[in-house]
Amino acid sequence: MAVFNKLLSRNEALQKVRAWQASGKKVVFSNGCFDILHAGHVEYLAAARELGDMLLIGLNSDASVRRLKGPNRPVCCEADRAAVLSALQFVDGVTLFNEDTPEELIGTLLPDILVKGSDWAIEQIAGARAVLDHGGSVLTLPLLEGRSTTGIIEKIIQLHTQNKQ
């Protein structure tokens, strides 16, 4: 599938970031589970891409999502989540990380701009210190109200329960 060409190993992601930066492009990095991609994700990622020239996504691996969200998550496997993110025209690359946070990945990549949703305080954002110490920026973007993967899952469970009655 052609969309998989945006899925990068950590080493490939580092090579891409350095090449982009060497050509004068501003690299934006964001991360998350992105389980059941929804309009809130799409709006957030589109806004993140507008902050720079290239957008790289750090995607939690399945094992990482399970540790963070519980044994019933993710709903969609990492290959499917990576494929859906890769299909977005404003996403330039996706790389998986298996750790609980992308701090090590961000410290290696050193993007120009690190972005998270406004539900995060800058001092709580993994990798923020490394980006700031390297002269980069750390920003938060507003979230589309009422959109969340957990909310979608809860609605599906509620509908399923109602249909069983």
Image (tube, rainbow, N blue to C red):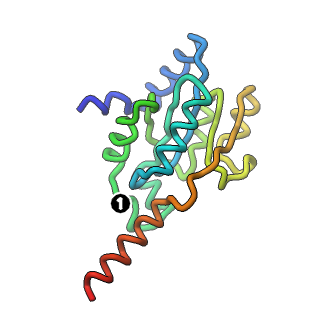
Kindly give the residue lying farthest to the bottom in the view shown: 165
Q: Is residue 18 above or below residue 158?
A: above
**Residue 144: x and y, percent?**
56, 53
> Which amino acid, by three-letter code, is at mark 1?
Val
Dot 1: within a 10 Å radius of its alpha carbon, few (fewer than 14), some, or many (20 or more) residues? some
Q: Is residue 154 above or below residue 120?
A: below
Residue 153 spot, x, y in % from top left: 40, 67
Total tally of numbered discs in the picture: 1
Question: At 71% from the left edge and 32% from the top edge, which residue is drawn?
Answer: 137
Q: Quadrant of residue 50?
A: top right
Q: Which residue is at a point 60% across and 36% down the rendered structure image?
A: 106
Residue 147: x %, y % from top left: 50, 59
Say what secondary structure mark 1 lies in.
Answer: loop
Quarter of the figure with residue 93: top left
Measured from the top left, where is residue 39 in percent x and y? 45, 50
Q: Nearer the viewer, residue 18 or 99?
A: 18
Name of the residue lying farthest toward the left: 1
Side (left or right) of 80 relative to 127: left
> Which of the two residues, 153 or 144, is positioned nearer the viewer here?
144
Q: On the rendered structure, is 133 left or right of 80?
A: right
| Quarter location, residue 162 | bottom left
Quadrant occupied by the C terminus: bottom left
Q: Residue furthest top?
A: 23
Which residue lies at the image location 58% right of the left edge and 12% below the top edge?
A: 22
Determine the residue positioned at 54% across, 52% down.
100
Q: In the rendered image of this protein, does residue 118 appear above or below residue 105? A: below
Mark 1 sits on what residue? Answer: 75
Image quadrant holding the N terminus, namely: top left
